[in-house]
Amino acid sequence: MAERLALIAGSGALVPEVIAAARNRGYELRLLTLGRRRDLRDLNPVPFSLADPQSAVDAIRAFGATSFVMAGGVSISDIARERLARFFRGGGRADAVGDAGLSGLATDLARLTGARLVGVHEIAPELIAPEGLLAGPEPTDLQRDTAAYALSLARRAGALDLGQAVVVAGQRAIAAEDIAGTDALLARVRRFRRLGLSADGASPLVLAKCAKPNQPMFVDLPAIGPVTIARARRAGIGVIAVQAGATLLIQRARLMAAANTAGITILGLAAPND
């Protein structure tokens, strides 16, 4: 009997890749979407809202899912976070939870549905970044040193439950990701460059993405894709450093081709020591 997988889908190109990987591995699939996605309507998805998490619980149970996975981008307001915490924690007053707390709510969803929580890396392990030079030109020693430093700063920012990314120039932090995400971070860096605030060209601009300390592998792994490359190029980024073994490479072939064309180095580095 095929394993039944419920896929809770957010936005972005990661979702179709996870769907394809799940089908290739023989899963019987049921798709739940946060909002409507026209590109997935042929799969008869079950739309639901974070304001009504019970509908997701009911859909997963009705499907008889043996496991479920979460993939894609999700924007969650503080009001929605409070509602989720109140629902999963048994009613009453509940403060808004941060990104780290959301992983605990995912575990609560597994408890309520009886389905096993799995990560994207288990469904599509080919999307996980390996260690080493992944695309673009061979980095200089200075770029490698800056990349390692940037990754350590991204880890420290994650410890504050902010974002998973930072941009540095040499040994100076330029900007850190916040609730607005990586695209907004790169847009800020682009503005800083126009204002002459970010770097004088002597120090390489490096974008680093790293999982937060103690972050479980089943939710919100850092990710980059072709859109990241396009925005990084406009921001003047020369190197992208990602945590090997814990970063998703979305649309991998297109990502690598875009990085090679833009002359942006992508490095997979081991996780910094906490």
Image (spheres, rainbow, N blue to C red):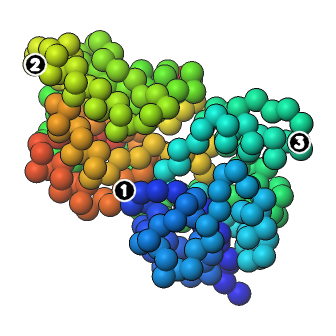
Residue 9, how many percent across, how many down? 55, 61
Is 256 drawn above or below residue 269 in the view shown? below
Residue 103 vertical placement versus 29 (above, below): above
Alpha carbon separation for disc pair 1 and 2:
29 Å
Q: CA distance from mark 3 to mark 2?
A: 54 Å
Q: Quadrant of residue 96?
A: top right
| 147 horizontally vs 223: left or right | left
Q: What amino acid is labelled 3 in the image? A: Gly
Q: Nearer the viewer, mark 3 or mark 1?
A: 3
Please report the residue visible at 42 percent of the width from the left and 67 percent of the height from the top.
Answer: 17
Q: Which residue is mark 1?
A: 250
Query: Which residue is located at x 17 percent, y 56 percent?
Result: 257
Residue at mark 2: 201
Disc 3 + disc 2, Cβ < 8 Å = no
User: Callout 2, which amino acid?
Assistant: Gly
Q: Nearer the viewer, residue 106 or 81?
A: 81
Q: Earlier in the sequence, mark 1 or mark 2?
A: 2
Q: Residue at x 22, y 54 (%)?
A: 256
Q: Quadrant of the C terminus?
A: top right
> Mark 1 is on which residue type?
Ile
Do the numbered discs 3 and 1 sit on residues whose CB atoms are within 8 Å?
Answer: no
Front-most of residues 152 and 184? 184
> Is residue 144 in view from this perspective?
no
Position in image of residue 37 (x %, y %): 47, 67
How far from the left and from the top, in percent, is residue 148? Answer: 33, 26
Number of other residues with Cα within 10 Å of mark 3, as a class: few under 14, some 14 to 19, many 20 or more: few
Residue 91 tag number: 3
Q: Is residue 258 left or right of residue 76?
A: left
